[in-house]
Amino acid sequence: MRLFEFESRQIVKDAGIPVTNYGYALSAEEARSAAAEIGGPVVIKSQVLTGGRMKAGGVKFADTPEEAAAHAAEILELEIGGHMPRGVLVDPKAEVEQEYYAGIVWDGTRKQPMMLFSDMGGIDIEEVAEQHPDHVGRGHFSNLLPFSDFQAKQVIAQTGVTGSELNRATPILAALARLFQTCDMTLAEINPLARLSDGRFVALDAHMDLEDEARPRQKALMAQLGIPAEEQREAHEATPFETAVTAIDSADHRGVIQGKDAGFHGNIGLVIGAGGGSLTLTDAVRSQGGKPANYSEIGGNPSVAKACGLAKAVLEKDGVEKIAVMMSIVSNTRVDIVARGVIKACLELGKDPGETIAIFRIPGAWEEEGFKILDHYGVEYCDRSVSMHEAARRAVEKVQGAAA
Amino acid sequence: MPGIFIDVEVAADARSDATLAAKLEEVCPVDIFAATESGVEIVEQNLDECVLCRLCLDAAPPGAVRVIKLYDGTEL
């Protein structure tokens, strides 16, 4: 769950990390008042859950409260990446000597949080890591053992920062690491972390992602930030595919389907699932050189109509000619029911199931019945004796062969 | 629209049996049978949802209901 900048700044402030004396405004008039209170040049920043604010005109500088109000009025009406702003942040324009980056990310491979620090802040940390790797310090830390500020100090020192700068930056990175843990974050970053002309460090911007599953544990934080339980936060507006799949799922209580396609541009449609298997299967397709057109989840014994609906939604996506129907593990989802659903989808779209379904690998209940159906329609299938990666390889080979 | 995978037939002499119609409507978990004034009606749009549970066969007199798997031509 992504948090707005004004919420992240509040969390950072509450954690004892110095921030500028900013204001949050929901109208041009409130922005004027906030700018007047700050009493100097300010930056007006759109509060949207997407990047690219500066390029889109969502960040503007103002020298007077009147100018701040005018900019705020414009920004509050400005849609950025399909998002309308929640409000604007009115931030004093700081006299910055140097910009740094401080961040904590979840390292899924190590299963540990990782601190990142750079003396080249204000720009994308991935870009710094690629072009100036010696300017990025890294260090994992345990979620089980007590955290020591010294661990943060070691990370910062890797970038060559020394002396009073090191001493001033250390408690900030350490506080960020602690709030990452206590607030169940998957991302907590301050960029830029600015060193002002008087030597003080302040957070000029902050971005945070909270683990979705942790919301019930973070009720106090949600209440403090004024986020109601029913409010869902997505990094992007639902695509037509995602909206369609959600509608199919909610129309029928039997089984569960999900579909995501934001950021997917491939040509192999995926109808996949089982026990968290969708991620593994997506990776399996990618590891075989395949380009998924979507991510999906299907399970819990869906109806034929629901399986059919998902398969149709996938097949109707631009560029998709074939689908791979796979589950990772033996489950109670009936093989014959899913087989009927995906074959029906092909037939209803006027496609030959034998040509359209690149592979069918669902191990589980009613396999034999499912295989009879697949045999009848000439669909290639395999059972649990064929690995997920081998099934993915066969699917990718067919899709690439068809495209060649 | 008839089923692609499953067909269900009710014998002609059983179709107007109101008691049987009510029983079939009650037992089928995927609503393939509807009890109407004229007796049993097949809800065609639900035919492919048949989970092959045999509850309709158990509820009806022998031979009154047939569940046919169109993909292999066999019957339950």
Image (cartoon, coloured by chain):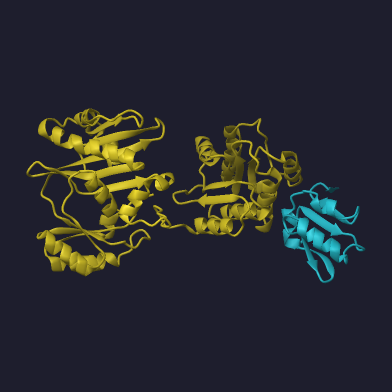
> Quadrant location of residue A160?
top left
**What x and y, as percent, mark residue A146?**
30, 29
Residue A4 is left or right of residue A379, and the answer is left
Please indicate, yes or no, whether residue A320 appears anywhere in the rendered image: no
Q: Nearer the viewer, residue A245 or B12?
A: B12
Q: What residue is rendered at 87% in x and 64% in y?
A: B15
Q: Nearer the viewer, residue A203 or B58?
A: B58
**What x and y, as percent, mark residue A352?**
69, 51
Q: What residue is rendered at 75% in x and 57% in y?
A: B47
**What x and y, as percent, mark residue A392?**
58, 37
**What x and y, as percent, mark residue A3?**
33, 51
Report the label total.
Answer: 0
Q: Residue furthest right?
A: B13
Q: Is residue A36 above or below residue A299?
A: below
Q: Specify the quadrant that holds the C terminus of chain A.
A: top right
Q: Is residue A404 above or below residue A72?
A: above
Q: Residue furthest front?
A: A220
Residue A259 is left or right of residue A23, and the answer is right
User: What color was chain B assigned in the picture?
Assistant: cyan
Q: Residue furthest left?
A: A198
User: What color was chain A assigned in the picture?
Assistant: yellow
